[in-house]
């Protein structure tokens, strides 16, 4: 369910009552509320999560009342002062500066994301702060979008609709707007986890010939679900007709997709990234796409985000760029916000979270 704007406003009013509107309450109620743990939420998260927090009676919270612009850093540093819990999204850098500003009360951080490259894990660990995140609930949505992006890129759908709309559609032509098909292909997955498996499961009915993957080590349990073969990084590059990046961004995977990888790929291959932009060296990708070293790329993530409209990648017909929407279904985003809220509440109660990062 996606609440109307009015309903959302009402929820926010309920939610912020303890912190902002305490004047209308009896002094007893005020006293009781002021002892509740204080939480700051860095974004107007979907209603399911706000509902859980406001109905819990366990916390008093305040939120940045916008989904269109992130909370300015200066304001964030002010707002986190003395809080016990923090709910954030992937646009907020949670680093030493922010944790120092929050101070020693902060016990729990809950991010509404599966990715955690915006969090300084070392600093969190040092301070004994527990961290919740939101894997699993977004797997289906991300896998679905990855398949959509892959097909859009390989079958050149954006170019095709553009041609149809702008008069480029002449007579039926034998090789015009031809692309590459999944049937009989080898699909490579860089970083096999839940999402990689879910992508492969969706691609298999397209008559993919073979799934291959690479990771820091073989993952036989996951691989057996999709009958995928473990190969080296080089073999992944050489054999893949479609290469889908599913690994997390870490110091080890930063720009791992660079000219070395692209130079080993076939010139008929399609590169897809729905993980993090930082995994790719974008200059090298531009070079590979513009020289025909690879056939196309579909990106849901870039560096920076948003990618400036003047960026060279936008000039390429064989590059499809989406604005980081892989998990953007109403169902999934609500589930993510609910999981983030529940992780926070459990963490503040000192109980195991539903999904907690091991630091
Ligand atoms: O990390 C995540 O959760 C995705 O990139 C956005 O849903």
Image (cartoon, grey):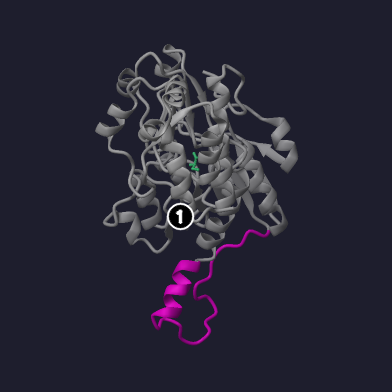
Q: Residues within 10 Å of mark 1 (few under 14, many from 20)?
A: few
Residue 230 in sight here: yes
Q: Quadrant of residue 134?
A: top right
**Range covered by the magenta-colored residues:** 157-183
Q: Secondary structure at mark 1?
A: helix
Looking at the image, residue 52 sits to the left or right of residue 204; the answer is left
Residue 176 at x, y = what percent? 50, 76
- In this view, the residue in front, 229 or 321, is 321
Magenta-drawn stretch, dominant element (helix, strand or loop): loop
Residue 350 at x, y = what percent? 57, 16
Residue 218 at x, y = what percent? 65, 29
Seen at 49% across and 87% down, the residue is 171
Residue 7 in magenta stretch? no
Q: Disc 1 designates what residue?
A: 6
Seen at 45% across and 25% down, the residue is 33
- In this view, the residue in front, 132 or 67, is 67
Residue 134 in sight here: no
- Compared with residue 153, is residue 250 higher up or lower down, i.e. above or below? above
């Amino acid at each position: 369910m996606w609440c109307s704007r009015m309903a959302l406003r009402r929820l926010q009013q309920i939610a912020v009552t303890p912190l902002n509107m305490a004047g209308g309450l009896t002094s007893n109620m005020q006293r009781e509320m002021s002892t509740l743990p204080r939480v700051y939420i860095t974004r107007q998260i979907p209603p399911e999560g706000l509902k859980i927090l406001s109905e819990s009676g366990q916390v008093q919270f305040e939120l940045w009342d916008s989904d269109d612009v992130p909370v300015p850093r200066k304001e964030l540093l002010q707002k986190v002062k003395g809080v016990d819990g923090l709910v954030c999204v992937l646009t907020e850098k949670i680093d030493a500066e922010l944790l120092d500003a929050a101070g020693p009360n902060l016990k729990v951080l809950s991010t509404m994301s599966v990715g955690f490259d915006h969090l300084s894990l070392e600093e969190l660990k040092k301070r004994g702060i527990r961290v919740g995140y939101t894997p699993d609930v977004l797997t289906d949505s991300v896998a679905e979008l990855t398949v959509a992006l892959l097909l859009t890129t390989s079958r050149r759908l954006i170019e095709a609709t553009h041609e149809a709309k702008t008069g480029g559609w002449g007579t039926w032509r034998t090789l015009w707007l031809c692309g590459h098909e999944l049937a009989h292909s080898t699909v490579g997955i860089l970083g096999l986890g839940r999402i990689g498996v879910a992508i492969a499961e969706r691609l298999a009915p397209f008559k993919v010939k073979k799934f291959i993957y690479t990771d820091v080590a073989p993952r036989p349990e996951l691989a057996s679900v999709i009958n995928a073969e473990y190969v080296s990084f080089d073999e992944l590059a050489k054999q893949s007709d479609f290469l889908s990046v599913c690994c997390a961004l870490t110091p080890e995977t930063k720009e791992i997709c660079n000219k070395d990888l692209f130079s080993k790929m076939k010139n008929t291959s399609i590169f897809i990234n729905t993980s993090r932009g930082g995994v790719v060296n974008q200059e090298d990708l531009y070079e590979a796409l513009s020289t025909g070293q690879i056939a196309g790329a579909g990106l849901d993530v870039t560096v920076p985000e948003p990618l400036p409209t003047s960026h060279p990648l936008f000039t390429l017909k064989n590059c499809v760029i989406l604005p980081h929407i892989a998990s953007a279904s109403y169902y999934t985003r609500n589930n993510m916000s609910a999981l983030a809220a529940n992780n926070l509440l459990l963490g503040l109660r000192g109980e195991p979270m539903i999904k907690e990062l091991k630091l």
